[in-house]
């Protein structure tokens, strides 16, 4: 560590890296009611999820290089400030198109919190402990889908206004701004900073795309993110609209899924003492593939019910809990001086492709979970094949000082 202990750094970063999860999940219980309130279609409201994912991905391509050029703290402070403003714009939206634009800004700012947080871990934590630190952060961050939907449902039931969920995010951001200003240290020395220019950007991208390990790990993270994002997208339709689950009870199903993810991340940190990160990824992706095909099978032989949807979904989510920490630790390992660029490109791949996959799944009417099962199941099998083809040393083809 350069200044603070791992525990202190994680404590500072955890709420900042929850900005994405909170913004994604807190308004989910309101989704079935927002089309009428904004005089639009269900599909357009679903796009507020997809555009957030795209913004999270593309925004990291902006925020990562900026953090490599101007330092981590300045970009983190700017990101949380913009996040607060964007959340206010979401609350003030009177049309679906204004909301979509505000969600795009909110996503870009949340991406800054995420990519800078990942870069800070790479700056501050020894490589042998980085996977552990990322896994702990992922476990803490999974509290967002545990808390946010229930909180969003409470705010909606109490106020009968979906805007209340975004006003909560405004308050959250206003609390975080002074914390970042006072307690977050700068972890990137001026000597290690890279100017923002096309030469550095192109050199960085060539390093990443020429590293097979980086691409395979980023693809694995994309599948893991798709599992969570697609649950966010289809669960309000299947549970609230199709199965008539009440808004207040909907949060419990989110909590079950989130608790499954938390338990998996705990097992992941334990397994990191016994297995290599690559083998943990292979295990997690295999579980995702099994759960997805079980979901498809159940969807074909049974009528839609909460158990038919949630039981295999929990298997999938359990597998996803083994993906994120090991994947990003291995992907970031060779790129010390380009941690911001690496985290940005990794995030672009993870979030943008997850958004495309999610948009495909909800493009057609969601009457059951079969589209989820066949899509994620097929993509997970491809990832399993690639992970087993990858050697443990392949990620280190490039110099660590790159």
Image (cartoon, rainbow, N blue to C red):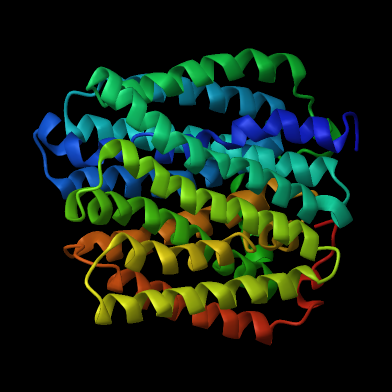
Q: Which part of the image, by quadrant, shows the C terminus?
A: bottom right
Residue 318 visible in the shown view: yes
Q: Residue at x 90, y 38 (%)?
A: 1
Q: Residue at x 38, y 58 (%)?
A: 230
Residue 211 visible in the shown view: no
The quarter of the picture where residue 34 lies is top left
The quarter of the picture where residue 335 lies is bottom right
Residue 232, percent from left and from top: 37, 51
Q: Residue at x 39, y 24 (%)?
A: 87
Q: Residue at x 38, y 74 (%)?
A: 295
Badge count: 0
Front in this rendered view, residue 253 or 34: 253
Front in this rendered view, residue 28 or 94: 28
Q: Is residue 239 left or right of residue 52?
A: left
- Decide: is 71 above or below 383: above
Residue 355, percent from left and from top: 38, 56
Residue 346, percent from left and from top: 59, 56
Residue 283, percent from left and from top: 65, 75
Front in this rendered view, residue 156 or 128: 156
Front in this rendered view, residue 85 or 307: 307
The quarter of the picture where residue 140 lies is top right
């Amino acid at each position: 560590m350069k200044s603070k202990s791992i525990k202190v750094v994680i404590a500072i970063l955890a709420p900042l890296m929850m900005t994405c999860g909170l913004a994604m999940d807190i308004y989910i219980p309101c989704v079935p009611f927002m089309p009428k309130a904004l005089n639009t279609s269900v599909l357009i409201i679903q796009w507020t999820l997809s555009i957030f994912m795209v913004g999270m991905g593309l925004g990291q391509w902006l925020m990562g290089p900026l953090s490599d050029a101007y330092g981590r703290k300045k970009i983190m402070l700017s990101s949380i400030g913009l996040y607060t403003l964007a959340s206010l714009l979401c609350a003030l939206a009177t049309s679906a198109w204004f909301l979509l634009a505000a969600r795009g800004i909110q996503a870009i700012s949340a991406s800054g919190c995420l990519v800078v947080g990942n870069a800070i871990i790479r700056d501050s934590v020894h490589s042998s402990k980085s996977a552990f630190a990322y896994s702990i952060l992922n476990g803490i961050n999974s509290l967002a889908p545990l808390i946010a939907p229930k909180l969003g449902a409470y705010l909606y039931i109490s106020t009968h206004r979906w805007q209340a969920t975004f006003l909560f995010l405004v308050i959250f951001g206003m609390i975080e701004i002074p914390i970042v200003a006072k307690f977050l240290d700068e972890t990137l020395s001026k000597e290690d900073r890279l100017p923002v220019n096309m030469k550095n950007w192109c050199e960085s991208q060539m390093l990443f795309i020429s590293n097979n390990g980086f691409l395979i790990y980023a693809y694995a993270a994309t599948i893991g993110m798709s599992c969570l994002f697609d649950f966010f997208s289809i669960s309000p339709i299947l549970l609230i609209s199709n199965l008539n689950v009440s808004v207040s009870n909907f949060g419990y199903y989110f909590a079950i899924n989130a608790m499954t993810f938390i338990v998996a991340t705990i097992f992941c940190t334990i397994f990191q003492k016994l297995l290599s990160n690559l083998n943990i990824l292979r295990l997690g992706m295999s579980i995702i593939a099994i759960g997805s095909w079980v979901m498809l099978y159940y969807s074909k032989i049974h009528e839609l019910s909460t158990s038919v949807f949630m039981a295999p979904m929990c298997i999938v989510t359990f597998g996803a809990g083994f993906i994120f920490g090991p994947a990003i630790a291995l992907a970031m390992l060779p790129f010390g001086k380009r941690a911001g660029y690496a985290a940005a490109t990794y995030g672009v791949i993870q979030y943008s492709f997850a958004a495309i996959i999610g948009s495909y799944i909800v493009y057609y009417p969601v009457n059951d979970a079969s589209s989820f099962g066949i899509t994620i199941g097929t993509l997970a099998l491809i990832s399993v094949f690639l992970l087993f083809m990858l050697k443990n040393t392949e990620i280190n083809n490039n110099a660590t000082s790159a």
